[in-house]
């Protein structure tokens, strides 16, 4: 995206995403696509779902416009958009008629392989390609797991996109800003009080889009993988440690639950706004460390990222114990 097009282009993405979110809310109300309160959910009133389709549509339209402006990028954008359509499509289907885990995972794997194919085409590096595929599959599901309270998944995606906009080289940074703009258009409908949830169509798509930015960072050798993961650390730590605990306890880990740290905070009496802002504060600190680490030479940048991960894990255990005491 050329500088002359940057500001009006991003504003257009914001407005399109906001307009489509309003349309999606009306559609969800007409179709009775509502998430009902329950023991395994953190909201108290029935709320429309599927608003994330607006983010998806805004990103696809942006890819189309970028392809027109830069024809050399058309093939890459087409393959990436195909992966996004796969992830969003299976999520949209699941929002309307819940699907078993296996077909959803199969589609996620296929989308991850498309992303890996792009990285392989760009770099010829098997490690970077495999890392991109695994990261796509992981982030699609992590964002789905963590999309449980007002504004949390959207604000974390926004902060991560802004981090990559500051970290990555100019052409890729523009794509990160496009993602941030799409989330900004959706966010007022989801925070501080959710009038619509993003649904699986939105959470999975955000995970895939963020994986795409990390893959671009790997392909351009902008930073080591460990540094590129710092902006995602709040969700990676909460989802990863919660999942590990459920597996070790022999629980049915694929079923919905309220055991993530953010859910425990809400159950212990904190508001959605407080919890989301707490995670956002951690995310801002992560952005600062990302930018500092990026200026360090290897292996210091990777050691800084590992230290941040250790701090995040320690904070997770401490806050989890605090929430357990409050619940008790």
Image (spheres, rainbow, N blue to C red):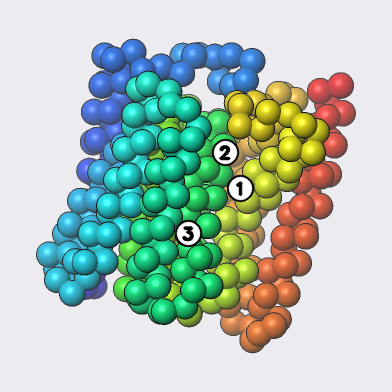
Residue at 72%, 63% (x, y): give it.
308
Circles 1 and 2 in contact, beta carbons < 8 Å: yes
Residue 192 sits above or below residue 180 on the image: above
Residue at 18%, 74% (x, y): give it.
72
Residue 199 sits above or below residue 154 on the image: above
- Frontmost of labels 2 and 3 is 3
- Badge 2 marks a residue whose secondary structure is helix
Residue 246, visible in the rendered structure: yes
Residue 80 sits above or below residue 152 on the image: below
Reading the image, the residue beneath label 1 is: 235
- Frontmost of labels 1 and 3 is 3
Relative to residue 45, is residue 227 drawn left or right?
right
Circles 2 and 3 in contact, beta carbons < 8 Å: no
Q: How many labels does the image show?
A: 3
Residue 35 in picture, x, y percent from top left: 46, 18
Reading the image, the residue beneath label 3 is: 133
Circles 1 and 3 in contact, beta carbons < 8 Å: no
Give 26 or 88, whichever is nearer the viewer: 88
Reading the image, the residue beneath label 2 is: 146
As measured in the structure, the alpha-carbon distance from the residue carrying label 2 to the one carrying label 3 is 20 Å
- Badge 1 marks a residue whose secondary structure is helix
Relative to residue 200, is residue 253 drawn left or right?
right
Q: Which of marks 1 and 3 is nearer the N terminus?
A: 3
Residue 56, image quadrant: top left
Residue 279 in picture, x, y percent from top left: 62, 45
As measured in the structure, the alpha-carbon distance from the residue carrying label 1 to the one carrying label 3 is 18 Å
**Quadrant housing the N terminus:** bottom left
């Amino acid at each position: 995206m050329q500088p002359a097009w940057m500001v009006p282009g991003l504003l257009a993405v914001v407005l399109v995403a906001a307009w489509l979110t309003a349309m999606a809310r009306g559609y969800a109300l007409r179709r009775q696509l509502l998430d009902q309160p329950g023991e395994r959910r953190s909201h108290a009133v029935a709320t429309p779902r599927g608003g994330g389709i607006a983010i998806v549509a805004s990103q696809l339209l942006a890819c189309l416009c970028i392809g027109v402006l830069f024809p050399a990028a058309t093939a890459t954008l087409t393959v990436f958009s195909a992966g996004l359509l796969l992830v969003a499509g299976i999520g949209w289907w699941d929002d309307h008629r819940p699907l078993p885990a296996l077909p959803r995972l199969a589609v996620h794997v296929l989308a991850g392989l498309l992303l890996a194919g792009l990285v392989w085409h760009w770099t010829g590096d098997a490690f970077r390609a495999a890392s991109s595929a695994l990261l796509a599959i992981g982030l699609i599901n992590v964002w789905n797991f963590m999309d449980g309270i007002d504004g949390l998944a959207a604000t974390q995606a926004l902060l991560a996109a802004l981090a990559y906009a500051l970290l990555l080289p100019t052409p890729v940074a523009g794509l990160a800003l496009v993602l941030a703009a799409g989330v900004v258009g959706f966010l007022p409908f989801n925070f501080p009080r959710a009038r619509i949830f993003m649904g699986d169509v939105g959470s999975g798509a955000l995970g895939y889009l963020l994986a795409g930015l990390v893959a671009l960072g790997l392909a351009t050798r902008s930073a080591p993988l460990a540094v590129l993961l710092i902006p995602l650390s709040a969700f990676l730590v909460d989802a990863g440690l919660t999942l590990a605990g459920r597996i070790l306890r022999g629980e049915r880990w694929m079923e919905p639950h309220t055991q993530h740290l953010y859910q425990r905070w809400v159950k212990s009496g904190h508001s959605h706004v407080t919890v989301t802002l707490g995670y956002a504060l951690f995310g801002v600190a992560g952005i600062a460390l990302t930018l500092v680490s990026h200026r360090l030479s290897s292996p210091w940048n990777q050691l800084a990222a590992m230290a941040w991960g250790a701090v995040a894990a320690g904070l997770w255990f401490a806050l989890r114990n605090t929430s357990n005491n409050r619940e008790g």
